[in-house]
Image (cartoon, coloured by chain):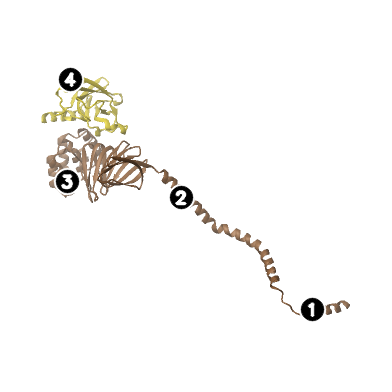
Amino acid sequence: MVKKLVLVLVLGAASVWADGLSLTIGPPIAAQLLTPTKKFLGIFAVRINGCADVSKAQLTAMGEGLIGDERRSAPTRPDPTVTPGAYIVSRQWGNEGKWVVAVTATCGTETAGAIVPTHLNNMVREDIQLLPHAPTKAEIDAALKAFNPAQ
Amino acid sequence: MPERNDDKFVRDALDRLPVVEAPDSIWQSIQSSIDASLDAPVRVRERRAFWPRYRWAFAFAAAMLVAGIGLYWRTANRPRWEVTLTSAGKTSQKAVRAGDWLQTDASSTAEVRVGTIGTVEVSPRTRLRIVTTRPDEHRISLQHGQIKATITAPPKLFFVDTKSATAVDLGCQYTMNVDDYGNGVLNVTLGWVSFEWQGRESLVPAGAQCRTHANAGPGTPYFVDAPRAFVNALEDFDFANGGEASIGAILANARQRDTLTLWHLLSRVAPRLREQIFDKMISFAPLPKGITRDKVLALDPQTLETWKNELAWTW
């Protein structure tokens, strides 16, 4: 567990200074929404790094859940914040089952991604995966299978 | 000369007439005539004198009347907050305005709608006063007890005063309890709160809390899941003159996200201890671009702000 945490922290820190496109995931308090009334719904904040023109960057997020044996998907729209290139992702699903959020960012020809496990209105930091590409279905399924928020 | 003789005759006749006093009625009649002739010009003079003498009094009275009407209008129309009181399972409604007190007993609670920006839930055994209800400033004074504030508004519109600190909303949800002396704790569940007193400021994010003590003001914020030894050492430092020994225990027990606390301590310790804290912080994550050791140790405000904003992504 400690090794995992260290790995995530290193990856997270590295993402900030990497030359290519990358993402930083943090708590909602790391970003401030343009519309304050919506911030209470935020699970986590995401920041796009390494994009020369973040105004042209694209960010999408999809909730991927497993309720019993049933797979579900629930799109969620990242809300822009006062910081260009930083967004807050909100929960658009219920309390049942376990859910991760697949995040994909594009800037020009580059793509970066992340899989963020969630528990109710919180992200589970130690299980975040930062990826140099959009999350694949296999990666999402594997993350859902491995993720156990009750632990 | 016959005329001269006539004059003499008349004078002699007059001299011989007996002197008779005129009746009083004649004198009264004369006096009335004189008074009547004098009355007209006197009234004119008095009318002319009246206005210069009293016009300021009338103007003052008129001004007071207008002011009174204005005050009444303003009082009747000043912003008010709707309150739902719950006691023994029964609810009732009332409105409160600036200057009003609100108190709950052991078996009652209240929910205050703070204009259009949020709500304040008032726990039992709580006493507070409504201080300001302006659209640009909503302020209450918490005497004792506990409140839970949920504010959805731009920052710095909602304030809670206590005897030892003021909670400044930065868009948030939090609970705050305090005793009659000003000892208490602020616990933030969403967003940020600035906890301030006499120039000292503690920034408390969601998941963190901050104690405040009478005559000492707000302490240093910490995450509620911080190790017990870390919290104990922090309390010693903040409120028991723990000094260097406390800092040693704080650093020994700090985790990555405890950089929230360490960041605040940078500006609250002597330079030598500041270096130790800095070294501990960069052991968790390297300094971001643009942040230098020298500027941090010199407590450059812009540098500290930038670093805090970057650290928040790791909390």
Same chain for labels 3 and 4? Say yes or no: no
Report how far apart the C-alphas of labels 2 and 1 lie in the structure.
Answer: 77 Å
| Relative to B49, residue A136 above or below | above
* First along the sequence among labels 3 and 1: 1
Query: Which chain did the image draw in yellow?
Result: A
Hey, what amino acid is under mark 4? Asp
Q: Chain of mark 4?
A: A
Q: Are marks 4 and 2 in contact (CB under 8 Å)?
A: no
Badge 2 crowding class, 10 Å Cα cut-off, few under 14, some 14 to 19, many 20 or more, is: few
Report how far apart the C-alphas of labels 4 and 2 lie in the structure.
Answer: 73 Å
Q: Label 1 belongs to which residue? A: B14
Where disc 2 sits, the SS reads: helix
Hey, what amino acid is under mark 3? Glu
Badge 1 crowding class, 10 Å Cα cut-off, few under 14, some 14 to 19, many 20 or more, is: few
Report how far apart the C-alphas of labels 3 and 1 lie in the structure.
Answer: 125 Å
Q: Nearer the viewer, residue B183 or A4?
A: B183
Q: Nearer the viewer, residue B47 or B290?
A: B47
Query: Which chain did the image draw in brown?
Result: B
Compared across the picture, whether B113 is left or right of B27 comes to: left
Q: Label 3 belongs to which residue? A: B235
- x and y percent of residue B260 in the render? 20, 38
Q: Label 2 belongs to which residue? A: B68
Q: Label 4 belongs to which residue? A: A69
